[in-house]
Image: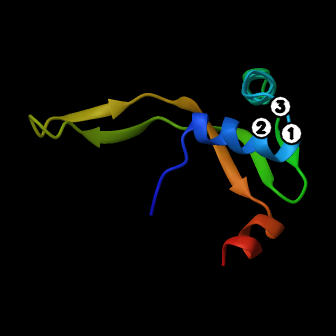
Amino acid sequence: MATMLKRDLVEEVSKSAKITKKEAADAVDAVFEAITKALKAGDSVLLTGFGKFEVRHRASRPGINPKTLERIQLPARTVPVFKAGKALRASVK
């Protein structure tokens, strides 16, 4: 099982859209920037048939430092989350 890297994605986009790798890299970067900008603003990004990117708030919770086994309080934080769409889940099966 291999991992697709960003450069592999750029190459696939370049071949599929019949554009240069530079143009494909710019397009991929633009998509990532748009998604990041929306998430930073607290918005969700829905790509029909693919999935949904959203931001979720995680409450503060107790934890344990694995080195010292000391009990600590993990701070609340905001994290990005991706939920695969129905069509993507079906195509992966």
Q: Quadrant of the C terminus?
A: bottom right
Q: Which one is earlier in the sequence, the residue at label 1 or at label 3?
A: 1
Q: Which mark is residue 61?
A: none
Asked if the residues shown at circle 1 and circle 2 are in contact, with their CB atoms under 8 angstroms apart, the answer is yes
Task: Give the residue pinned by disc 2.
Answer: 14
Residue drawn at point x = 68 percent, y = 39 percent: 11
Q: Position of residue 14 (x, y in %)?
A: 77, 37
Identified at 19% across, 36% down, the residue is 65
Nearest the camera: 30 or 46? 30
Question: What's the residue type where badge 2 is placed?
Answer: Ser
Say which quadrant the N terminus sits in. bottom left
Q: Is residue 35 visible?
A: no
Q: Residue 80, relative to residue 41: is it above or below?
A: below
> Looking at the rendering, which quadrant does residue 39 occupy?
top right
Q: Is residue 90 above or below residue 61?
A: below
Compute the Cα span from label 1 to label 3: 32 Å
Which residue does the image show at 82% across and 47% down from the upper left?
A: 16
Disc nearest the viewer among 1 and 3: 1
Question: Which residue is under mark 3?
Answer: 43
The alpha-carbon separation of the residues under discs 1 and 2 comes to 6 Å
